[in-house]
Image (cartoon, rainbow, N blue to C red):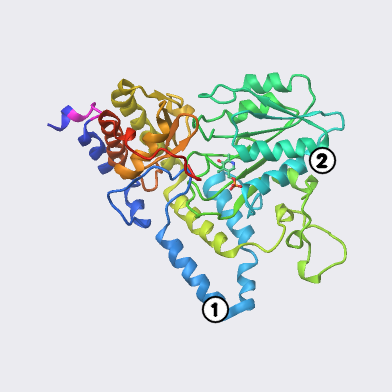
Amino acid sequence: MPGMTEHDPTARAYAVRLDREDPLASFRERFVIDDPELVYLDGNSLGRLPLATRDRIERLTAQWGSELAAAWDSWLDAPARVGDALAEAALGARPGEAIACDSTTVNLFKLASAALELAPPDVRAIVTDAGNFPTDRYVLDGLARARGLELRLIEEDPIDGPQPADIEDACRAGDVALVSLSQVAYRSGALADVEAINRAAAPARVLWDLSHSAGAVPVELERRGVELAVGCTYKYLNAGPGAPAYLYAREALQPQLDNPIQGWFGQREQFEMGRAYDPVPGVRRFLGGTPPIAGLLAVEEGVRITGEAGIVALYAKSQALTGLIVELHDAWLAPLGFELGSPREAERRGGHVSVRHPDAWPITRALIERAKVIPDFRGPDSIRLGPAPLYTRFTDVHDALDRLRSLVEDGAHREVDASRRAVT
Ligand SMILES: *Cc1c(COP(=O)(O)O)cnc(C)c1O
């Protein structure tokens, strides 16, 4: 009786039907999946390995082995080439506006420094939210201290994230040099209203961190009038551990921005080995030293798959996947003492959902050790469930939540070793 399961999200048949109707279903075959039983819901922390990336890295090692330094001719433009691919497939930006390099942490430092150099002399503060990703807060704190500025932390709503009104309050005195925020909050998954926040911050510039949004939601930097952004590639873009990050600077602003790390890869006519630093005019001036080629090629492959699937289709599936998590939370987890730690409305969330429980840490351990489900834990009480629309099936979400509720019902989380690990 197919009609009967249609409106019952707790029925496995409902998830089976969604998988059958999923236009992106075949993309799962393009990833390494060693254990079909394992449900991986941590793609928002480290995406899966694409088969094409494994081949590409193998070809790179062969090229390195045979061509040696002569291969630099084909490697030299990788940061700009990969930046352009990112701009098109994931960022909604134009060619020449993004470059792949360094880590998100380093890129945040470079762009924040460049933006602070442009701020009027009477400014006193940098604004971010208390719940922003730690490395973002640490970098901004260091910059504020070095420049004698105040780091003004917004105490945002833990579920909805920073709102335009919060930013307006923080910038009211007109003394703010820079606002830096994440488009999607790493803990709750709240999706920020980028355009309204940019307006609320003005005239202060806003630097966006896209680490948890690129590859999951349409970022649309051009259309939204974003000036500055950074983000990482190893989450929804599947580029692998420590793969280079990217930075974006709107074309009109680029000539005014100075890279605080004056490296030779940002230099005009680099191999003239000129005496004085004379940076190229475009976004390439934000390159520092020799780029990590293996990582860049992995970014290129990850971004290619995202581009083929299309960010609009990925976002639609992501909203459906997280929507199923919310429905199953309400039906199965809420009666067991869980609370939703993410916005309920699909248009206010990014690609992951947090569920909160006082025993979140032992439950996370039990999921990994006894139920073949990999989420991650974010203290004090959140279990993050990050379905990746390129390879997570609706039945994966169904099975993961089913295993989660039965292990809590059975008290299995009281039997695991609950000592903390180095990585959670
Ligand atoms: C993942 C993430 C980072 C990671 O920064 P790294 O320099 O790659 O370690 C930074 N900011 C946000 C918001 C993130 O989600």
Locate the N terminus and report the quarter of the image it occupies.
Answer: top left
Q: Secondary structure at mark 1?
A: helix
Q: Nearer the viewer, residue 377 or 175?
A: 377
Left or right: 382 with respect to 161? left
**Residue 106: numbered disc:** none
Q: Nearer the viewer, residue 363 or 401?
A: 363
Q: Is residue 222 visible?
A: no
From the viewer's perspective, is residue 292 above or below residue 121?
A: below
**Residue 65: numbered disc:** 1
Image quadrant, ligand 1: top right
Residue at the spot 25% in from the left edge and 43% down from the top edge: 20
First along the sequence among labels 2 and 1:
1
Question: Magenta stretch containing residue 96, yes or no?
Answer: no
Where residue 66 appears, as percent x and y from the top left, is 55, 81
Q: Nearer the viewer, residue 34 or 212?
A: 34
* Count of picture labels: 2
Question: Which kind of residue does numbered mark 1 sit on?
Answer: Gly
From the viewer's perspective, is residue 92 above or below residue 148?
A: below
**Residue 117: numbered disc:** 2
Question: Which kind of residue does numbered mark 2 sit on?
Answer: Glu
Where residue 125 appears, as percent x and y from the top left, is 77, 29
Left or right: 14 with respect to 346? left
Left or right: 62 with respect to 249? left
Q: Quadrant of residue 326?
A: top left
Q: Which residues are magenta?
A: 5-10
Disc 2 and disc 1: Cα gap in Å?
44 Å
